[in-house]
Amino acid sequence: MSVSTPGKLVIISGPSGVGKSTVVKDLLKRFCGLLRMSISATTREARAGEKEGVDYHFLSDEEFTRRRDAGDFLECTEVFGTGHWYGTLWSEVRPSLAAGKWVVLEVDVIGAQDVLAQYADAITIFIRPEEFQELESRLRSRGTEEEEVIQRRLSFAQGELQHADEYEYQVINETVLDAVDNISQILKNRGLPND
Ligand code: 5GP
């Protein structure tokens, strides 16, 4: 069933290493107050510098399963290529939408489909690299993943790119500034008041 609310959901997907998080962080600064980020839950470990409740809600496998069974998630999935569960908590979404805010969800292509099935008016944006090669360089320069994990994420990235056409908008992350400008324009065109 599709729901209509005062606020809107903005779904942002894109392959691992494309720089989604940086783009989204800058985007939020531009529309401070009106646009907020849904902090996902995950069973993966925090990377160096990541903070609980800021980057993710880091949950144990048991806690994630408990919350899934309790119906706490709008969507959740074992993100292919990571070996971990990720999900959007209702508590991150419902109160903001009810307050008329726009909420950004950074989810994989499966999560995007699940969200759209429930919120048909969600705006969908796919961030892609200028060239596939950039993903590998970014994943390596991050220096947080083992070689095997990098290879898994790259093959997953190829799969994700094949779904790009299912999104309303595709934005190339050539520079963060341009990508943020493009997404800002899309959101303004769709009715988000000016920054
Ligand atoms: P990372 O481990 O690099 O932070 O995230 C890996 C992938 O998990 C991201 O590329 C993103 O697409 C996906 N992801 C992050 N949060 C969620 C979520 O709440 N739901 C779903 N379905 N995917 C997510």
Image: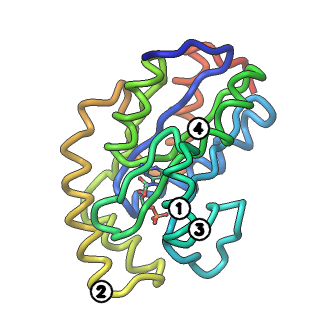
- State if disc 3 and disc 1 touch (CB < 8 Å): yes
Q: Which residue is mark 1?
A: 64
Q: Position of residue 23 (x, y in %)?
A: 56, 49
Badge 1: few (under 14), some or many (20 or more) residues near its Cα, within 10 Å?
many
Amino acid under disc 2: Glu
Amino acid under disc 3: Leu
- Of labels 4 and 2, earlier in sequence is 4
The dot on residue 28 is none
Amino acid under disc 1: Phe
Q: Quadrant of ligand 1?
A: bottom left
Q: Secondary structure at mark 1?
A: helix
The dot on residue 59 is 3
- Of labels 1 and 3, earlier in sequence is 3
- Of labels 4 and 1, earlier in sequence is 1
- Of labels 1 and 2, earlier in sequence is 1
Q: Nearer the viewer, mark 4 or mark 3?
A: 3
Q: Residue at x 64, y 61 (%)?
A: 57
Badge 4: few (under 14), some or many (20 or more) residues near its Cα, within 10 Å?
many
The quadrant holding residue 139 is: bottom left
**How many circles with numbers are drawn on the protein?**
4
Q: Which residue is mark 4?
A: 104
Q: Secondary structure at mark 4?
A: strand
